[in-house]
Image (cartoon, rainbow, N blue to C red):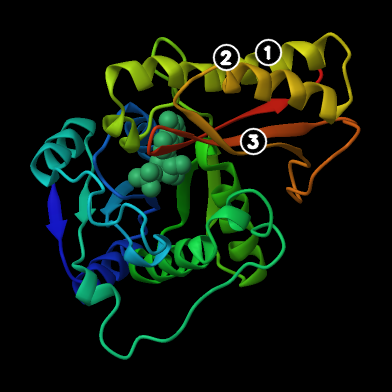
Amino acid sequence: MEIIATAKEMQRRSEQLRLEGKKIAFVPTMGYLHKGHLTLMHEGKKRGDVLIVSIFVNPTQFGPGEDYERYPRDMKRDLALLKGVGVDICFTPPSQDMYPDGFQTCVEVEQVTKNLCGTSRPGHFRGVTTVVAKLFNIVKPHLAIFGEKDYQQLIAIKQMARDLNMDIEVIGIPTIRESDGLAMSSRNTYLTAKERKEALSLYRSLLKGKELFLQGQRSAAKILTEITGIIKEQKSATIDYVKICDVHTLEDIEEIKGEAIIALAVKIGKTRLLDNIILKEE
Ligand code: AMP
């Protein structure tokens, strides 16, 4: 596996691969890899000739007082996992290379980033779309793979690619879960044993919401009451939001018609966790 640490060198290498006619698949990550990340990589291997993975904890998507400094990092372990999957190139730029002195350009997707995490984490998606746009310009992929766990992020990136004529196919992959249902996340490592147990209420509540939907309930308010009830039983849980939204616009829905998403962000102790489930007639 090649390891490349500068944007210049990565661009040169990608240009070379493109001239050789190779289809480049790309998976951007912030490292501290788990099976969810690895599933995106397996998909990338299937779909491209060359798989490039970036590991970069992006400072601009963390707000003041968030966990940028203490975000878990383990480069040695990550590189071993990447080799195991058969990743061809790992791009690991230092922060100074991505944001040199004088940096002043941002990408902002307006509508789909307003609700949900956009409300509770102002500036977060601006950081995400800016870094992903930069990574796309550096890695020059033909296709890029993201997780549906971060559903709003996936929608924002698809919108950005469409609006800015980026010639990149953006692919979403369903959420990978632990055997007990907890959505895999690098941040799960922050949870104590007791908190981890309580965190199971997130997926349990989403399943309950889906069950109600499948039984014919179409009132978002009624489904949300059940869900919040389940989460509020947990001592360590503080709800940031639980919402039912349109799957494309991410605007709130009152009466579910066709497809919808239940999306939630809940703090378990000090750890903010995200999860979601799609509601669709079976
Ligand atoms: P992160 O390192 O958390 O920025 O995540 C990198 C990519 O992995 C993003 O596209 C995430 O949506 C995706 N991802 C994170 N957790 C999961 C999961 N449990 N299942 C599927 N994809 C995931």
Front residue of this view, candidates 35 and 114: 114
| Badge 3 element | strand
The residue pinned by badge 2 equals 204
On the rendered structure, is 85 left or right of 157?
left
Mark 2 near ligand 1 (CB under 8 Å)? no
Between the residue at mark 3 and the residue at mark 2, the CA separation in whole angstroms equals 13 Å
Between the residue at mark 3 and the residue at mark 1, the CA separation in whole angstroms equals 13 Å
The residue pinned by badge 1 equals 208
Residue drawn at x 60%, y 48% is 152
Front residue of this view, candidates 109 and 230: 230
Q: Residue furthest front?
A: 235
Residue drawn at x 46%, y 68% is 133
On the image, the x and y values in percent for residue 7 come to 25, 72
Determine the image quadrant of residue 42.
top left
The residue pinned by badge 3 equals 263
On the image, the x and y values in percent for residue 256 come to 87, 31
| Badge 2 element | helix
